[in-house]
């Protein structure tokens, strides 16, 4: 339903990963909503963006530059396409990592049509020279093209047609203030509630011609980590299971059995997530334990544990990052059906973290 096209060749392939793979991109192209009325979730963002676009159309002007931030898979690319459709304008799509030199950006900007929407994904990863060129382009619709080198270099001003830049980022804190300040509208995309994901799943099932019961949709939604992209990926895998093992209709039992095969549990944790929790609980008594030690115990790279597994575990309240190391919460013990060790009192008279 609502997703991004963000891809990362270095990201591990996970059924509950929020980065789009090739299969996701192919399916998402057919499932994307075409206007704001079709877009599910993000109510405040939709309402505010609708006002911005309506006002721009009434004035006969291009829309203000838009910055969309939030985790992958929540709908930033989809909204950029909707902005272009609502304004009746073409859209040009590129990404920050693809713009390594100011000349790369100048070539794109100089070929824009009046009113065109330029979608710049992962804008925080753009090179600094290109970023500085973008300041003037956004504010004055002009860029200075440097011709020559050294003392003989000359800056040739190049006028640009009015355009709308839609920037998307998963790490808004990395954007410098001068760039953030040039966006007329800024929105943060929130994770979805299960009820919203159920609507996403029902819509996608209809478009994919998949039979699904309300309880089946709820089962998938509850394991989707608040992310539409993951919900649709799980829907496709459950559809495969239902077609092979049942009559093709997705019920709660079918969804549960299918996701058990793919090792996605009731809270959306997969093999890696559970391995991190089990090592933390069974080997280290719930912590605290250092990240490097935990990664060795799991058999994964330190970066994989920190960047792939931990964010969701922290967001779910299953793991906490402390100055002394990683610590499991009571919810983690409960989720794995384990009993926390009895609290002990140290020599300084202080009880351990979960002491009564």
Image: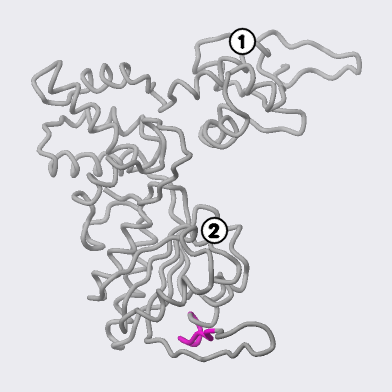
Q: Residue 147 appears in which quarter of the rendering?
A: bottom right
Residue 87 magenta-highlighted: no
Residue identified by numbered label 1: 282
The C terminus - image quarter: top right
100 sits left or right of 115 in the view: right
Q: Residues within 10 Å of mark 1 (few under 14, many from 20)?
A: few
- 248 is higher (above) or lower (below) than 314: above
Instruction: Give the numbered dot on residue 240.
Output: none
Which mark is on residue 125? Answer: 2
Q: Residue at x 56, y 84 (%)?
A: 146
On screen, residue 22 versus residue 212, left or right, reads right
Element marked by disc 2:
helix
The colour style of the image is one colour
Q: Give the alpha-carbon distance from disc 2 to disc 1, as whole Å.
A: 39 Å
Q: Is residue 68 left or right of residue 154?
A: left
Q: Which residues are magenta?
A: 138-145
Q: Can you give x and y, in whole percent of width and height, for residue 19 in the image?
A: 41, 42
How far across and down, in percent of the image, does residue 58 sit? 27, 85
């Amino acid at each position: 339903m609502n997703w991004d096209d963000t891809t990362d060749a270095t990201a591990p392939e996970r059924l509950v990963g929020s980065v789009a793979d090739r299969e996701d991109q192919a399916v998402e192209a057919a499932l994307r909503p075409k206007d704001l009325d079709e877009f599910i979730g993000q109510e405040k963002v939709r309402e505010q963006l609708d006002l911005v676009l309506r006002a721009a159309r009434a004035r006969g002007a291009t829309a203000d530059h838009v910055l969309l931030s939030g985790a992958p898979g929540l709908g930033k690319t989809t909204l950029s396409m909707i902005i272009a459709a609502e304004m009746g304008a073409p859209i040009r799509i590129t990404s920050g990592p693809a713009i390594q030199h100011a000349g790369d950006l100048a070539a794109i900007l100089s070929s824009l049509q009046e009113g065109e929407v330029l979608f710049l994904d992962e804008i925080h990863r753009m090179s600094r020279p290109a970023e500085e060129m973008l300041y003037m382009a956004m504010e004055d619709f002009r860029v200075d093209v440097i011709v020559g080198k050294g003392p003989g270099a000359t800056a040739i001003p190049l006028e640009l047609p009015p355009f709308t830049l839609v920037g998307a980022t998963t790490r808004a804190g990395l954007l410098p203030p001068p760039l953030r300040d040039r966006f007329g509208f800024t929105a943060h995309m929130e994770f979805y509630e299960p009820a919203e994901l159920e609507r996403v799943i029902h819509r996608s099932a209809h478009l994919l011609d998949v039979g699904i019961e309300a309880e089946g949709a709820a089962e998938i939604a509850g394991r989707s980590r608040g992310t539409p992209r993951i919900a649709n990926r799980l829907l496709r895998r459950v559809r495969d299971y239902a077609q092979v093992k049942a009559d093709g209709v997705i019920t709660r039992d079918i969804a549960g059995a299918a996701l058990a095969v793919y090792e996605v549990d009731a809270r959306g944790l997969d093999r890696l997530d559970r391995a991190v929790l089990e090592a933390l609980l069974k080997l280290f008594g719930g912590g605290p334990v250092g990240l490097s030690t935990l990664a060795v115990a799991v058999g994964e790279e330190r970066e994989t544990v920190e960047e792939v597994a931990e964010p969701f575990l922290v967001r779910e309240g299953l793991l906490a990052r402390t100055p002394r190391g990683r610590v499991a919460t009571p919810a983690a013990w409960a989720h794995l059906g384990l009993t926390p060790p009895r609290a002990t009192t140290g020599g300084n008279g202080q009880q351990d973290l979960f002491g009564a």
